[in-house]
Image (cartoon, coloured by chain):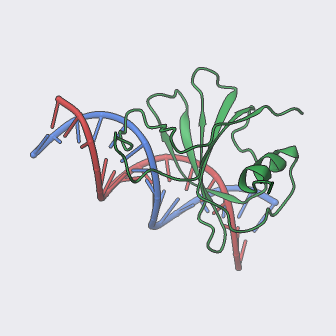
Chain colours: A green, B red, C blue
Amino acid sequence: MKVETRIQHHEANNISEGGGKVTKGDKKIRRHRFAFHTRSHVDILDDGYRWRKYGQKAVKNSKFPRSYYRCTHKGCNVKKQIQRLSKDEEVVVTTYEGMHSHPLEKTTDSFEQILKQLQTPAPS
DNA sequence: CGCTTTTGACCGGCGC
DNA sequence: GCGCCGGTCAAAAGCG
């Protein structure tokens, strides 16, 4: 199973379109924002961490509802939101928010490796 | 038994 | 002031 993953990262990318949470001259921008464009059919992409769904809301820009997940850990409050592209329902956008403070709990596939190098920048 | 998931409601911010 | 949108929490139920 080949998984096409595209990393967008960089908080400069404000995904807010209508909410207007990130207005011009925004100072409270969110750091550590990883946007994964994954070509998959399931939104529940296991990256090796435990996630507890805490909400689901439908965005106007997307035909499909957005899912909100949270990392269940002792002091690891990493948030993750999944959204499907209305243009391509087969494309899932996984946006990570926050930084983990613990190693992965499991090893799914090469997927974890992608996340690992993202969160663990290889020292020159 | 523990944990997770699901829906609704509520809230805050912004726009007009 | 109201409406809109997004985001989060709460409670309950279901499942392993």
Q: Where's residue A88, x and y in %?
A: 64, 22
**Residue A100 position (above or below residue B1):** above
Q: Quadrant of residue A70?
A: bottom right
Q: Which residue is painted at 63% across and 60% down in the image?
A: A99
Q: Visible in this render: residue A96? A: yes
Q: Which residue is painted at 81% across and 50% down in the image?
A: A112
Q: Visible in this render: residue A47? A: no
> How many numbered discs, if any?
0
Q: Quadrant of the N terminus of chain A?
A: top right
Q: Nearer the viewer, residue C5 or A25?
A: A25
Q: Which residue is painted at 53% across and 53% down in the image?
A: A31
Q: Where's residue A33, x and y in %?
A: 58, 48
Q: Is residue A15 left or right of residue A100?
A: left
The residue furthest top is A87
Q: Which residue is painted at 73% across and 68% down in the image?
A: A102
Q: Where's residue A111, x and y in %?
A: 82, 45
Q: Is residue B8 left or right of residue A92?
A: left
The residue furthest front is A124
Q: Nearer the viewer, residue A106 or A63?
A: A106
Q: Where's residue A108, x and y in %?
A: 86, 51
Q: Is residue A88 left or right of residue A18?
A: right
Q: Quadrant of the C terminus of chain A?
A: bottom right
Q: Nearer the viewer, residue A2 or C5?
A: A2
